[in-house]
């Protein structure tokens, strides 16, 4: 069943609907999940007055990484799972009321924003879920203002011989069984394991970002136990 999600990624947000209420608990069991996001969000190098797109924001763990950097600016969180957004909406009711955060239900492959709408885009565990990585990156570039930054935070297996084995064991021995115990679901987690094994390696994604037109492209391993599997990619528009 998870193979059909790989072949039909448009259905992924509906799978997230099923686990939305337990998502924070499941990821909370993954040591360092939030601090890794916080470290990636720091690469946005925000001053505080920016408008930032948090693409595939889910229940708002990535939003929580960006919001502390925002003073007079705002964050727009976009996701195509109604239930994930509902959890985020409850969590950030005060920020929404204060105009610091807006949440929108949209397909990340068909964004409706005007060109140059954002000073920065954060996409955490999002690109891997897109059916077409090139098309997604090409869509994001013009949404940035000149000098705007894109930061992608995602599992991307390093070129070391052991990174795929490390991920396979972590995935099938720990993530799938533990997630089943916390959410009662396995499909979306089996999809997670397969989608990472199918995703771009660091050099491939950097090359795609450059080919799309992003400049000053770099990527950074997380300085934690996830170093072989989790990376932060940074690129600028001009
Ligand atoms: C693993 S969660 C990441 C959530 C959050 N960024 C975080 O760091 O915890 C992936 C999210 O991507 C969303 N997603 C997947 N495909 C999408 C699409 N085509 N458009 C919008 N959201 C999508 C899912 O609904 C899900 O909430």
Image (cartoon, helix red, strand yellow):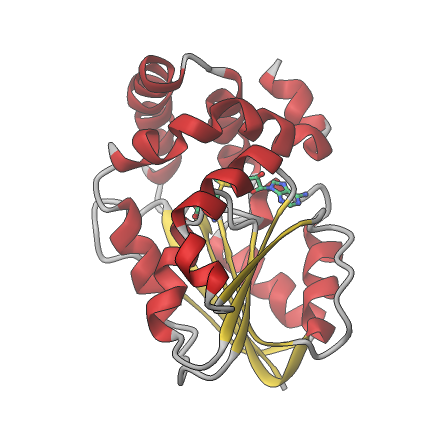
State the image coordinates of residue 198 (x, y, percent, origin top left).
57, 36
Nearest the viewer among 173 and 67 is 67
**Exactly how many numbered labels are in the figure?**
0
Q: Quadrant of residue 30?
A: top left
Nearest the viewer among 189 and 222 is 189
Q: Is residue 146 left or right of residue 195?
A: right
Residue at image coords 49%, 30%: 192
Residue at image coords 50%, 44%: 58
State the image coordinates of residue 201 (x, y, percent, origin top left).
50, 50
Q: Is residue 155 left or right of residue 13?
A: left
Whether residue 40 appears in this view of the structure is yes
- Residue 215 vs 6, above or below: the answer is below
Residue at image coords 63%, 71%: 210
- Residue 93 vs 58, above or below: the answer is below
State the image coordinates of residue 164 (x, y, percent, origin top left).
40, 34
- Residue located farthest toward the front when viewing the structure as drawn: 97
Location of the N terminus by quadrant is top right
Residue at image coords 21%, 40%: 31
Location of the C terminus by quadrant is bottom right
Ligand 1 quarter of the rendering: top right
Nearest the viewer among 102 and 167 is 102
- Residue 150 vs 33, above or below: the answer is below
Whether residue 159 appears in this view of the structure is no
């Amino acid at each position: 069943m998870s193979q059909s999600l790989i072949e039909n990624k448009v259905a992924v947000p509906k799978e997230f609907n099923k686990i939305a209420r337990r998502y924070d608990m499941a990821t909370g069991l993954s040591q360092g999940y939030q601090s890794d996001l916080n470290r990636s969000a720091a690469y946005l190098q925000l001053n505080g007055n920016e408008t930032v797109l948090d693409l595939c924001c889910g229940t708002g763990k990535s939003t929580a990484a960006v919001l502390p950097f925002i003073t007079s600016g705002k964050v727009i969180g976009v996701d195509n799972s109604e239930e994930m957004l509902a959890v985020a909406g409850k969590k950030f009711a005060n920020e929404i009321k204060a105009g610091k955060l807006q949440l929108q239900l949209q397909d990340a492959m068909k964004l409706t924003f005007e060109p140059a709408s954002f000073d920065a885009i954060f996409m955490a565990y999002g690109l891997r879920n897109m059916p077409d990585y090139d098309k997604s990156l090409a869509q994001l570039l013009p949404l940035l203002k000149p000098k705007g930054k894109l930061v992608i935070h995602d599992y991307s297996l390093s070129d070391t011989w052991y990174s795929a084995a490390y991920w396979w064991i972590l995935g099938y021995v720990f993530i799938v069984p533990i997630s089943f115990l916390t959410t009662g679901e396995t499909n979306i987690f089996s999809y997670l394991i397969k989608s990472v094994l199918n995703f771009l390696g660091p050099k491939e994604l950097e090359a795609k970002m450059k080919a799309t037109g992003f400049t000053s492209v770099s990527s950074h391993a997380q300085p934690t136990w996830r170093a072989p599997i989790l990376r932060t990619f940074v690129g600028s528009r001009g």
